Amino acid sequence: MAKLSTEPQMWCGLEPPDQRSSIMNVLSGRAGYGQIQGNIQINGTCGEGRSIAELRSVTGFVPQDDVMHRNLTVEENVSFQAQLRLPREEGTTSLVARAKQCEAATTDILEQLGLGDSQLRKTAIGDEQVKGVSGGQRKRVSIAMEFVARPSLLFLDEPTSGLDSTTSHSVVDVVTQAAKKQRCTTIAVIHQPRYETLRLFDNVILLAAGGYLVYSGPTADVESYFSDVLGVRFPPKANPADTLLDAITVDAAAAMLAKGDMRQNGSSLGSPVEFGQWLSETWGKHQTTYQQAPAAKMHVPLPDLAVATCTWGEEIFIHMKRAAVQLHRDREQVIWNNLLLVGGLAIFCICAPAKAPQQELMHPLLALFLLLLTQGVAAQRVFGGRERFVVWREAGVGTNTFLCFLGRDIAALAEVLLASLLFAALYWPLGPLTSSHHTIFWAAFVFVYAAYGLNYICSVFMSPDTAQMMAVVMAFLAFLLAGFNPSFSSLSAMPLGIGPIVMALSPMRWAYGFLMHDHMLQKLSGFANPMVRLSAQSMLDERGMPLEWISKSGWTCSTGSVEWNWKGEHCPDGGSDCSSFRPPNGFVCKMTQLLLLGIYFRAIALLCMVITSRLKASGGGQLVGGERKSGQLQRNILLRRLFIIYLVLLTDLEVCLLLETQ
């Protein structure tokens, strides 16, 4: 409904009275709601059917909220963006040359935006709990994160939001200078700028209700247009920007007309849309007088859309290095989380020792439950909370989400390793298991690895609060599906054969089955005594540990698949005195299946992250727990349904793969 033109290296300030962010989303290709129609012209050439989203490799977008890593310093936030997105110059193929290029670009943009102080550069951004930089400095950091990538076109969504007038003017001033130095066309939505701030813009664009264009031209001529054509009187002590916004808002314009501060066609004040249409028609009659030379006379060479930044290996390493730095900054939280694990496990082993052979069955399961609870909460930090907002922001400017996921997951292996070492070091001497130390460590490592993958899904698929609750719920469900209570035999006998399927999705079932299998084979186990084993035969059979049947049948790990063992086989008449009787066997001989399950959970989490990031980058909502906008396209709803169907099919395939292994 509006035709906008921007010249190269010119600043444009958009001041619609409402829905400022919606207009910016349309211009930057991030509006995934409603119906968007129109064409894009570059250097006067019509690109019918093209989208501004295709130019993301050479464009930048500064969101209204200051989305960044709050536990990183000012310099680190900008430096990592340079390493990921700065176009590679000739002669910077080596790692050393590339590092020098990124360091020089970071220093240069920090100096341009007034962030060059050595102490300020080393200051963490901070949040509600940790004091950091000021609001204006944080806004400059957010802008520097885009400028350092040297975009040809930069969008800023209310860069002065939440700032006082003095700070707002300072931010706009330094950004204007940086844009001119980098020859970057910059389009910004601003909120009630003061007059001095307004004059920093080369051009100003005003839109009335309904999206009607009412002015698009030099900032220096906007007052004369409204004064000469519309008869608007600018009070001497009033902010001209506020007067302009009042003049294009129907209610405020009616009040101005009644006071004689505006000369207007009274019949056009029937509705906001009619009023906006009238203003647009008026502008169409006078725009040739107030507009600058057409953009066709100010052509510049188009940038190469295939910008070379960093290789896949370099990008993975950058994400891994950034995650490692964040892990170091959050070391206090990591320490407390592992202290909870160590303290809880020590208290459990000392106060509730397994004195009887029957208690050997329940004790490891409760220890695994504690491990799953603590590490499930720790895993939320990798991709949950504010971290996912940064992922969405970077995805909106073309950063590879898959490589981001891979790099951060590799860095998280340090936490997985630490938790596994602590668990094995403590539970091996204090617990009832007779397995070797390295066996307990290997089981704990693969178990925590799978637990992290499971909780990744929650952190990227749901809101932070919901994800935290689901971490506890999933730990409880995994405990129920481990095969102790309800018993393994009752789970394996569920209707339609779904028992082995649901148990196969529980990391605790695999880890518990593996540890108990290794423990039962040790001569030091309480169940090595034939009398103890015989007296507990019924309980062992119910829990999927048929030791008597195994000793008689000569069962080994190579006998049948997991599904064959888990289901068992009962006599047709319901009795037990027949040759075909085979009790359900829940022993797990190796941890390969659990390792595959952890990889599968990560594949699902990655798929959720990629789809969610693309939805957010295009203006869509979350897959689960997000607010649906009133005009959201039906294709997003269809995409979500297809995604759920795909997850079901993929889960079925993974379960079949796990159950068919030995």
Image (tube, grey):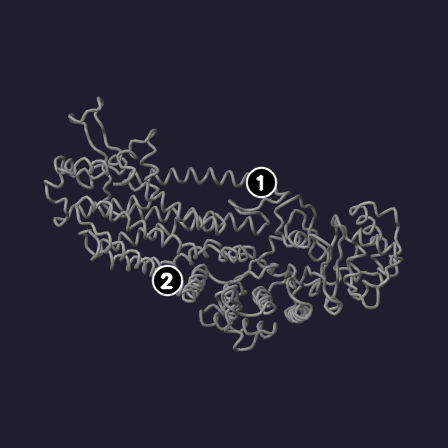
Residue corresponding to mark 1: 635
Tell me the amino acid under the disc marked 2. Answer: Trp
The residue lying at 14 percent from left, 35 percent from top is 553
Front-lying residue, 259 or 308: 259
Q: Quadrant of the C terminus?
A: top left
Tell me the amino acid under the disc marked 1. Answer: Arg
- Figure quadrant of residue 379: bottom left
Spot occupied by residue 150 in the image (x, y as percentages of width and height)? 59, 66
- Figure quadrant of residue 560: top left
Mark 1 vs mark 2, foreground winner is 2
Question: Disc 1 to disc 2, how far (Cα)?
Answer: 45 Å
Spot occupied by residue 295 in the image (x, y as percentages of width and height)? 74, 60
Residue furthest front as drawn: 351
The numbered mark, 1 or 2, whose residue comes first in the sequence reads: 2
| Above or below for 397 versus 136 | above
Front-lying residue, 425 or 648: 425
The secondary element bearing badge 2 is classed as helix
The secondary element bearing badge 1 is classed as helix
Dot 2 surroundings within 10 Å: few (below 14), some, or many (20 or more)?
few
Front-lying residue, 260 or 590: 260
Residue furthest bottom as drawn: 118
Residue corresponding to mark 2: 336
**Which of the numbered marks, if any, corresponds to residue 9?**
none
Spot occupied by residue 366 in the image (x, y as percentages of width and height)? 28, 48
| Above or below for 412 versus 631 | below
Spot occupied by residue 349 in the image (x, y as percentages of width and height)? 24, 54
Front-lying residue, 185 or 265: 265
The residue lying at 54 percent from left, 65 percent from top is 86
Left or right of 183 on screen, residue 117:
left
